[in-house]
Each structure stands twice: as structure tokens, then as C-alpha cells.
Amino acid sequence: MLFNSLEFLIFLPLCFIVYWFVANRSLKLQNVFILVASYVFYGWWDYRFLSLIALSTVVDYFIGDLLSKQDSASSRKRLLLASLIVNLGVLGFFKYYNFFVDSWITAWSGLGVEMHGSTLNIILPVGISFYTFQTLSYTIDIYRKKLEPSESFVNFAAYVAFFPQLVAGPIERAMNLLPQFSRKRTFDKEQAISGIHLILWGLFKKVVIADSCATYVNSIFDNYQDHNSLTLLLGAVYFAFQIYGDFSGYSDIAIGTGRVFGFDLMRNFKLPYFSRDIAEFWRRWHISLSTWFRDYVYIPLGGSRGNRWQQLRNVAVIFIVSGFWHGANWTFLVWGALHALFFVPLLLVNKNRRNLDQVAHSSVLPSLKEFLQMGTTFMLTTIAWVFFRADTVGIAWEYFVRLFTSGNFSVSYLNIERYSIEMLGLIVVLLLFEWFHRKYEHPFVGRFIWIKISLVCLMLLTLGVFSNHQEFIYFQF
């Protein structure tokens, strides 16, 4: 079920009514309803894959319980290993089986050896990477004795399948979200209004920005051989805003929906395109994933401890693993490797934690230095996004070759393509909204709130009605 679909427009108010006016008689009933609603939400896409969520839920619930009762270090390690094998095994099979088989055959073909392998038409279950990491955080934190196991199977199952963030995050830690299922929840008007504002802002970023950009991105990337340099440059920029509007829009809708039901989910994006270096970008982009890798992969590897070569190794591992998490394609590995290369110079000069404050914190506009830093960071991330979007590494390379060698930066594309100027205007509107509200969670605060809401609703109606409701990009991860 898509957040930007008619089905969800009906599903959400119905859940709201039942949750607050029927199931509010007891906390347990509310949690049971959340669990049922979450399974309906996910099963709307393909009910068969509910078995995978159920498997992860049952395995990790009982392993977590056993971990809390074991004092033997070796027994605890075996239990943790069992959780890792089951969860990563299922994830690896559905997400990477065909990739490894095809890569094996291609590698031998390059050496002149013809091999034939039987790959399966495996459908990637929506959100499997997200809820797998969510359940793993539960068992790992119990193993580390940072978390007590849940006493209620219903609460834990509802935590794993919580529908607002089930299929594309934020990847919630058990330490943050799970205790909320044990606390009494009463309707809070201000919290609900804040949630609705976030939903509205997320829909704006998804429907008005991301889906509008997608029209141009798909056309440009599918026919990159026929376009001039300016068009290819715009294609890369459009995709940068498509994936930002798409993914951060989903996160805003998820957080807002959770808030409507009395839950607080972590913020997943903090204006990443206003970052002044790559390190700051990764503190602001997909925060739930980057902090997950930091706590469960990077720090256990040694983090920033050790000599310089060990630090560089850890950085390389974390970015490449992050790339591979996004998909079974060499393009994602290159994307991760590029970000590692962009990050390394900051690490070498000990400036990777330089920009921890808000940009232009005490002024309306950025300084020239900050403006150039933000421009450079955006350029680097946009270069990497081309590999993320391209079907193959070869296509991404050809895209850049044409971009830098055709030498034609005429504005003919802007005049020929319908509404291209308007698309650039929408991106400017997004940037202005975010810049002048960069100290807040969303723009619907402060003065002129109803004017801003009316403007967003008008754009949603005019563009949303005629747009093709596309799936969220991160559904495929």
C-alpha cells in the first residue's frame, strides 16, 4: 500500500477511528490493532511475504528471551549467531542470490569459460532490508546487555511490523520504539496536528517534487545518448532531488503517521543538501541507517581507533557495505566506494567532525565560504547519484563521458521540454522553504502557517491529481 494512494487515504482515517475510539479501552487492544493493521498494510502488496516478517519476529523474540536467561558467553554467542544466520540468510537469499550467481557466470565468461547457472525469478520482498535490521538491533542490544527482552510477544510483533515505517524506515531501534508499546497512549491534539503537518509536507516532497522530477529523470537517463551536456547535467540534478524528495518524503509521512497514533519515531533527514562536507551529509542523510552501521559495524571494527590504515579500512568497509545494502548491483558498490573516497580526505586531516552546528546558524544567508562548501558537497553527491540511478556501471560512465565531452550547454532543452522551467522553479521553492525553516522539523511553523499550508495543498491538488503515483524508490531496498 502506497502512502500516496487512494487505498491509504481510506486506510489511515479508518485506522485512526478504530484505534482512538474503539481500541482505546486497553493498551493491549491498541497494540493488537496496530499489529493487525500493519499486517493488512503489508499484505496489501503481497500477503505471501507476511511469512518472512512472522519468521523474523518469532525467531528474534525467542532468541532474545533465551539470551536474557543465559550467563554462558559461548551460549550467548551461539544464540546471537543463530539470529544473524536466520535474518541475514533470508535477506541474502531474496536480495543477493541472483546477483552472486550472475556475477560468478560473468567472471568465468571473462576468462573464456562458458558456464550455465540457473537463477530464480526471485521477487524482492518490500522493506526486507529495513525490518531485518530492526529485528537484529533487538537481539544485538540484548546480547550487549543494553536492553531487556520484551515480555509481550504482541508488543514485539507490533514493533517489528509497525506499518508507518515498515517498508522504508526510519529503521527504529528497539530501545527507542519498543518501550512505547508498553506505555499508555492518550490522544494528544497538538501531537496529532504536528503529525498531520509532517504528512502533508512529506506528500509535497513526494508528489510535487519527486514524482515531477521522475518524469524528466526517466526520460533523460533512458535516452542519455541523444541529449546534450546541459540536459544530462539537469538529469543528474533532477535525480538528486527526486531521491531526496522521495525518501525524505516517505520518512516525513512515516514519522507524521506514527505521531498521529501517539508514537515518536526518529528523524531520518536533516536538510542534507545544506551540508558543508560529505561527513556532515552522512550525519543528515538516512540517519537511521548511517547510525545503525556506525553502532553495529563501524565501532565494532574499531571505529576511529587504531592507526590511520585501520581507520581508512573501517571507513571503506562501512561505505561499501552501505552501498551493498542498497541493492544487488555493482552500481551501488561504486556509489558507496565514491562516498568513501570523498570522506577519506576529511579523515586524513581530522576534519570529519568539523561541521556539527547548523549552517548559517546566526545569520539569514550563508557566507560565501559556506555557499561554496554546500555547492561542492552537492556536486560530489550528485556525481555519486548518477551511479546510483544508472542500470550499470558502464552506462553511468558513458553518461559522464557525454556530459563532459559533448560541449553543448545550450538551453534548447529548457525550451523544448514542457514545464522544465517550472520544474526548476519547484526545486527553488523547496530549497527556499527548507532554508528559511532550517531550524525547525518542517516549514509549517511560525508566521503565515496557513498561507504555507494552502500553497502546499494547492500544489498537491494541481500536480497530484494529474501525476502518475509512482512507488517510493526505497521500496526496492
Image (spheres, grey):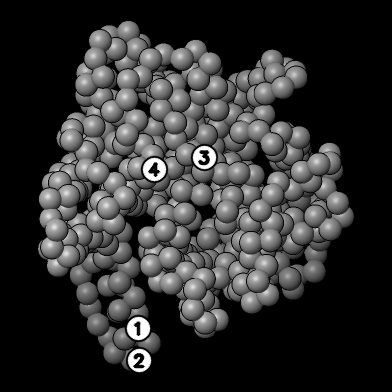
Give the residue type at disc 3: Arg
Apparent side of residue 134 relative to residue 467 in the rendered image (left or right): left
Across and down, in percent, residue 430 comes to 70, 37
For disc 1, the neighbor class at 10 Å (few under 14, some 14 to 19, many from 20) is some
Image marks 1 and 2: residues in contact by CB distance under 8 Å = yes
How many angstroms separate mark 2 from mark 4 (CA)? Answer: 45 Å
Across and down, in percent, residue 54 comes to 18, 41
Q: Where is mark 3, residue-wise? A: 267
Q: Where is mark 1, residue-wise? A: 107
Q: Nearer the viewer, residue 204 or 257?
A: 257
For disc 4, the neighbor class at 10 Å (few under 14, some 14 to 19, many from 20) is many
Identify the mark nearer the N-term, 4 or 1.
Answer: 1
In this rendering, the answer to whether 176 lies above or below 343 is above
> Mark 2: which secondary structure?
loop
Q: Where is mark 4, residue-wise? A: 172
| Residue displayed at 62% across by 55% down | 281
How many angstroms separate mark 1 from mark 2 (CA)? Answer: 7 Å
Identify the mark nearer the N-term, 2 or 3.
Answer: 2
Give the residue type at disc 4: Glu
Q: Where is mark 2, residue-wise? A: 111
> Mark 4: which secondary structure?
loop
Across and down, in percent, residue 230 comes to 76, 58
